[in-house]
Image (spheres, grey):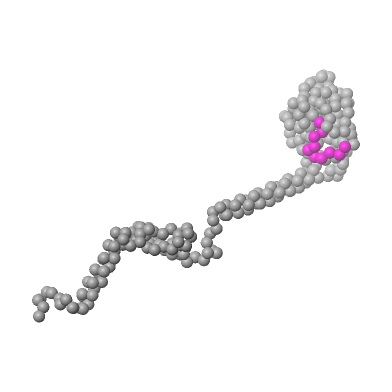
Amino acid sequence: MAPVGHEHSNSTTPARRVRVALLGLTAAAVVGASGLVTPSVSPAARASGLQFADSPATAASAGPGAELNRVAALNQPVAERPAPAAELTASDMTDALAAREAELSSRSTQIKAEAERQAKAGVFLRPTAGELGSTYGPRRHPILGYVRLHAGWDIGGTCGQPIYAALPGTVTIATQAGQSGNYLRVDHGTVNGHKLETSYQHMQGFAVKAGQKVARGQALGSVGNTGLSTACHLHFGVIKDGANADPAGYLKG
């Protein structure tokens, strides 16, 4: 009989089988941690760009989440995998350029439509840059010294700066006219039921001539100091149904 407390060498009791199994797992863990066993990775798998741990210890340090992501990537169909970054960048740039061109085209169309609407509504374009000086109404003339109607607006400016057509129309006069200096007049036809014309006085020179059709915003000439004038400026007048009218009804100060 075997001594009490010792098992027979040929014993196959459940307790012995459990101990053997545990010893085997422990040995495998030791061998794996020592780096003696390296997982085999095929060249095709490495060429795919997927990241693999070089040892069981490295794989374990990456955590279970990394392993799950690796397995999911391997199981993902090739057609559903993201395209390379370079291809995405080129595609994004092409789409962005097309979207920008479409936006600019739309804005250009809107601007042209608004300009046409304003022209039809009789909205004047400011004929030149500069601050508003004398307005429409009676005033003492700075040279002649007596009070008379100032039939327009004086818009201060620098000699030589451009003057633009307030509305589209046809140039009817472009000449030197005594006290008005170089004088230009544009017929805009019927606007909102009234015949409208604009006049531009004391100009330095003309960029258009009588009989020429002009667009809203087209250069007519330049600011000057000709005729009875004390400084470089534009005298801008409005003629409504053949009579002088206050530009305030058509132009902001």
Chain part drawn in magenta: 212-221
Q: Is residue 93 visible?
A: yes
Residue 218 on the magenta segment: yes
* Residue 13 rendering spot, x and y as whole percentages: 20, 78
Q: Is residue 49 left or right of residue 151?
A: left
Q: Residue at x 73, y 33 (%)?
A: 253
Q: What is the count of numbered marks?
A: 0
User: Within the image, what quadrant is residue 238 found in?
Assistant: top right
* Residue 29 rendering spot, x and y as whole percentages: 29, 64
* Residue 8 rendering spot, x and y as whole percentages: 15, 77
* Residue 222 rendering spot, x and y as whole percentages: 79, 29
- Give the quarter of the figure containing the N terminus: bottom left
Q: Residue at x 78, y 34 (%)?
A: 127
User: Height in image: 144 above or below 62?
Assistant: above
152 or 189, which is in the foreground? 189
51 or 132, which is in the foreground? 51
Q: Residue at x 24, y 68 (%)?
A: 23
User: Height in image: 119 above or below 53?
Assistant: above
Residue 237 on the magenta segment: no
| Residue farthest toward the bottom in the current orientation of the protein | 1
User: Within the image, what quadrant is residue 175 found in?
Assistant: top right
Q: Is residue 196 visible?
A: no
Q: Residue at x 46, y 64 (%)?
A: 74
User: Within the image, what quadrant is residue 46 found in?
Assistant: bottom left
